[in-house]
Amino acid sequence: MTAPHQPWDLLVVGGGTAGIVAAKTAARLGARVALVERDRIGGDCLWTGCVPSKALLAAAGRAAEARRAADLGIHVSGIEADFAGVMRHVRAAIAAIEPQDTPEALTAAGVHVIQGDAVFTGPTSVDVGGERIGFHQALIATGGRPAVPPVPDLIEAEPLTSDSVWNLESLPHRLVVMGGGGIGCELGQAFARLGSRVTLVEALPLLLPREDPDAATLVHTALVRDGVEVLAGHHAVAAHGQPGGPGELVVDDGSGERALPFDALLVAVGRRPGTAGLGLDAAGVEVDPQGFVTVDAQLRTSNARIWAAGDVTPHPQFTHVAGVHGSLAASNAVLGVRRRVDASAIPRVTFTDPEVAAVGAPTWSADGGKPPLTVTRDHADVDRAQAEGRTDGFSRLALGARGRILGGTVVGPRAGESLAEVTLAVRKGLTATDLAGTTHPYPTYGDGVWNAAIAVVQGRLAAPITRRLLAGFVALRRAWGARPDGRRRPRG
């Protein structure tokens, strides 16, 4: 390993998904790599995001399945959530995955790990704990953190966020959730299923405002079914209460104020970039008005030697995007290539029940303009959904010229898995005919996407001009088949 005082080929600042993938990629390419992390290696995904939240959702989902088992003729009594046991499962999931992201794992991959706060002191150097470290290229991958809106007295109430909710030791009796996006809906539904009385507050008229409105409506219905009181179109105007303890959130829907009492308040209204205190001015790295690091199509910043990837950039804040972009930025930095970000097929999944998964072009009129050409198959027509009693969903494809698949939305159990082939179709420019002509396993929820593609092909066959052409062809075949020898009449 190169001595610390020598400039590193690539210095990575931040040990989350983007930083880990970037560092390992650069090391595999033969570069001398160092990674600086102030806290725990693994980032939000491992400690406060993907892993703990999906473990919590799994536990809550089991409780919900038991409660509705009677619909399938199975009667379960005495359903009780042991919150301490649930949290043990959450911590066990983290512990099982953590070894992939330890400093030891990075060291084994050829990455030198430095613990501490990195502050840029110039265009090619950082300070970590009073030690100057130089670099030829650097990557900023410091991620983001939960945002807290400027509601009077909200900060003083010390609300929970997606970072701190995992410190709960007991289940809140009354939980108020601010934010009807993906995180708010997921955690709100989970806590309701575990036994909390949940009220979810969203300022906009619909939940999941970035998704197909039909999908948002299904999620709204599912949350209400699980006992969540959904207050869409309500703005928070004040918060009162003890720090981290009981209090009330005052909301207004335009017709008057209402106080929502809580034992715990969870704020889930988005995230802000982790750029504070990095000394970006000294490095010549520009940020946008929201504080995100400005990058070009190759993920290079305004300093030609510094790159950025993950939630610290304006790109979609998903772990899979952070990983792909971390690898891309590291390759560009180390090899001098100019690979560009491909934003045409970035999948996203909201892990509510039902799940909402989408990719590519919107399947609704997102800007109020001309609606896209779409084809939809309700899951009432999907045999697997009928067999499992889970018909509350749909598969919808957005189509372009000649039936090219431009995007899709899938709502239902394991919708993220069903979306995988739609993502590939968008990425590779496949058509509905390509999907319809591919043999799919039966019966699966993937039949929804397949049947939607088949519907496109059937629609083309039903077109008048196509029907006339086919009728003429069949008539010719019928005439040939009527000959005694079954052969065509010779020409001439």
Image (cartoon, grey):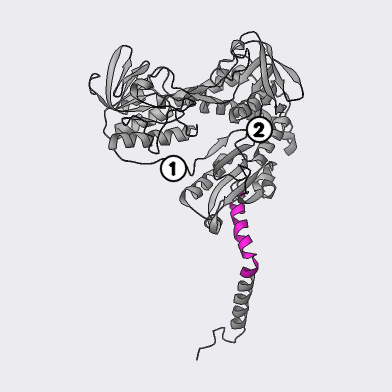
- The image shows residue 298, relative to residue 183, as above or below, that is below
Q: Which residues are magenta?
A: 448-466
The residue that mark 2 highlights is 207
Residue nearest the observer in this picture, 153 or 472? 153
- Who's the residue at 60% across and 57% down the image? 456
- Who's the residue at 60% across and 36% down the image? 210
- Who's the residue at 54% across and 87% down the image? 489
In percent of width and height, residue 267 lies at 60, 21
The furthest residue to the right: 255
The residue that mark 1 highlights is 342
* Classed neighbour count for the residue bearing mark 2: other residues with Cα under 10 Å, few (<14), some (14–19), many (≥20): many
Residue 382 in view of the camera? no
How far is the residue under mark 2 from the one under mark 1?
28 Å
The furthest residue to the bottom: 492
- The image shows residue 388, relative to residue 313, as above or below, that is below
Q: Secondary structure at mark 2?
A: loop
Quadrant where the N terminus lies? top left
The question of residue 459 being in magenta is answered with yes
Q: Amino acid at mark 1?
A: Asp
Task: Report the side of 232 relative to 118 (left or right).
Answer: right
